[in-house]
Image: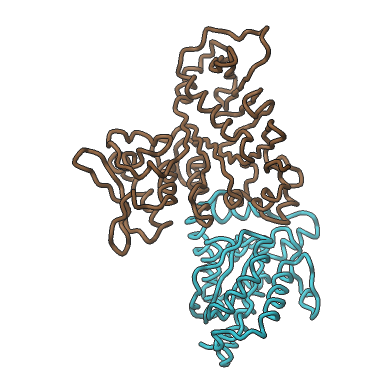
Amino acid sequence: MIASVAFRKFKALRKTQVALLPFNLVIGPNGSGKTSLIESLLRLRTLAPLPQATARRDKSAPEGPQITFKFEPPHDALTALISCTSEEVCNLLEIHPPEAADWPALRTRLALIRGYVLDHSVMGAPAKREDGASLASDGHNLAAVLARMSTAAPDEFSALTAHLLRIMPEFHSLELVTHPDGRVEFGLRLAEDGLLTAAELSQGMLYLLAILTLAFDPAPPPLLCIEEVDRGIHPRTLREIRDALYRLSYPKSFGLQRAPVQIVATTHSPYLIDQFREHPEEIVISQKHGRAARFERLSDRADLPELLREGSLGDMWFSGILGGVPDEP
Amino acid sequence: MNVAVLSESPADEAALRFLVGAVLGRPPRLVAPGFRARGWPNVAQVLPAVIRHLHFNTDAQLLAVVVDADDSVVHGRSHDTPGYFHPHCRMCQLRAVFRQTNKKIARSPRPHASAGGVLRGVGVAVPAVEGWYLCGRDDSVTESAWVAGQESGYRPYSRAELKLRVYGTDRPSLPLQIECALREIERHRRDTRRLEYDFPGFAALADDVRAAGRNQSEGRLAP
């Protein structure tokens, strides 16, 4: 959906841009702008449904922070610009051309962008059944989303369950229980009997289930941002995480007919990075120099094929050869 | 026979288990869990530790290892000359690791003495294991075709093309990868000669597995 994002003086992103593919895994040291990239997309989501601002930038004022978005066809003639009217207020969205006929359609889609920083401490809690329209940004309504999926989209729910049980063969079924107060809770029944309630599940299990819930969402958003997508997951299971994300971004590869979901995910896991050896173009490295950072596509490195003969992508990244590592004194 | 497997993915592991059984003519008893490496050169890096672990802590009799050749030098007959070692050939490198590690631990008594030493089973898939999967289905895919391509500078296919031919997509899910791998190698269940002829990197593995099987049947290894 979004073709590129260009930054000027936005936090650590002083002057850089990144072209976005269907799937994008952003890596780099802390404070290098990974979250700022996601924040910019979520800011666009927030501002897009609002009426276009009538205020205009003060062109005589010093240049402030600015984020420029370009879009994939059929919206490639449009540009969205978020800039600041003052040092404190950075919420002016301008569309070029201002009267673009396709802006209403695009803004409707932009409003559907979702961002996730999943939190295991809330994902296991019972949730109101009516709150299950879409997974909340911290995943606190996971039980409600699963309950809604089980009735509104039973095929997807069955597929999700089958997928989960294949990865975690110690379990027999995913079960939903409705409390007298109307809240719903989920649990996993062990193959050897006994039910583990959501509160008893491990952190990693909750993260895995949340990612699979997104992957099997019957009505996924056009763009999904996920922070630390590998969090809590065993390195050997990261292939399943990659597959779940590819299911969203490349539905045809999974025999699905729906539109692709664009994904921007971040990680610090060399093991997850290893999963993209065949598609290094999907990795964006945030290079930090001092307090400023810029984005680079891994596939832009001319010597990448030679490097890959010598070691894994994750090792290459950790070693510093690819950049995207913290400065050291 | 007690067989341990070291591979790069669960799909490779499933195929390797099947192929070892096909060569032996009976299903092996597998040492669990399967050992996993993160691609080359990680396989060579973890291999000594895996051999040591198997030697001291398990009753494994054979360790089967398969890696993709990628763009490395393909093992040739000249490499089998006694004392020869090609530094850029993955078969030579893995065999050397086996040799050196077994030499170091040979003096230490093995708790499972009846198992003998941990025997070598090394195969190299040229250029990738998907080549093996296409054997018998796509005549243009052979180890000699790849080597000829290396020599002429014109590769007959890429690794990505092989994946596309096997899986129908360049981003297969793990279940699809396993399903396709097992479906394709089913052709070799009763007779692996075609696979051995077209892919000497597999024939080397088959020879190792047969040698281990002979050791066992001659009473040098526990059944």
- The residue positioned farthest toward the front in the image shown: A329
Q: Colour of chain A?
A: brown
Residue A151, compared with residue B69, is above or below; it is: above
B62 displayed left or right of A325: left
* Residue for point 46% across, 32% down: A114
Up/down of A26 relative to B56, above or below: above
Which color scheme is applied?
by chain
Farthest-out residue, bottom: B219
Say which of B164 and A149 sits in front.
A149
Which colour represents chain B? cyan
Seen from the viewer's position, the closer of residues B127 and B116 is B116
Residue B171 is situated, as x and y percent measured from the top left of the image, at 55, 49
- Compared across the picture, whether B84 is left or right of B114 comes to right
What is the x, y in percent for residue A133? 34, 33
The reply to whether residue B114 is visible in this rendering is yes
A272 relative to A146 in the view: left or right: right
The number of callouts visible is 0
Q: Is residue B8 above or below residue A230?
A: below
Residue, x 55% and y 89% (percent of image)?
Answer: B114
- In the foreground, A189 or A2: A189
* Residue A233 rendering spot, x and y as whole percentages: 49, 51
Q: Residue at x 40, y 43 (%)?
A: A121
Position above or below: B151 against A316: below
Q: Residue placed at 67% from the left, 85% from the top?
A: B107
Q: Name the spot of residue A292 as percent of width and height, x first.
A: 69, 31
Q: Quadrant of residue A193?
A: bottom left
Res. A153 in view? no
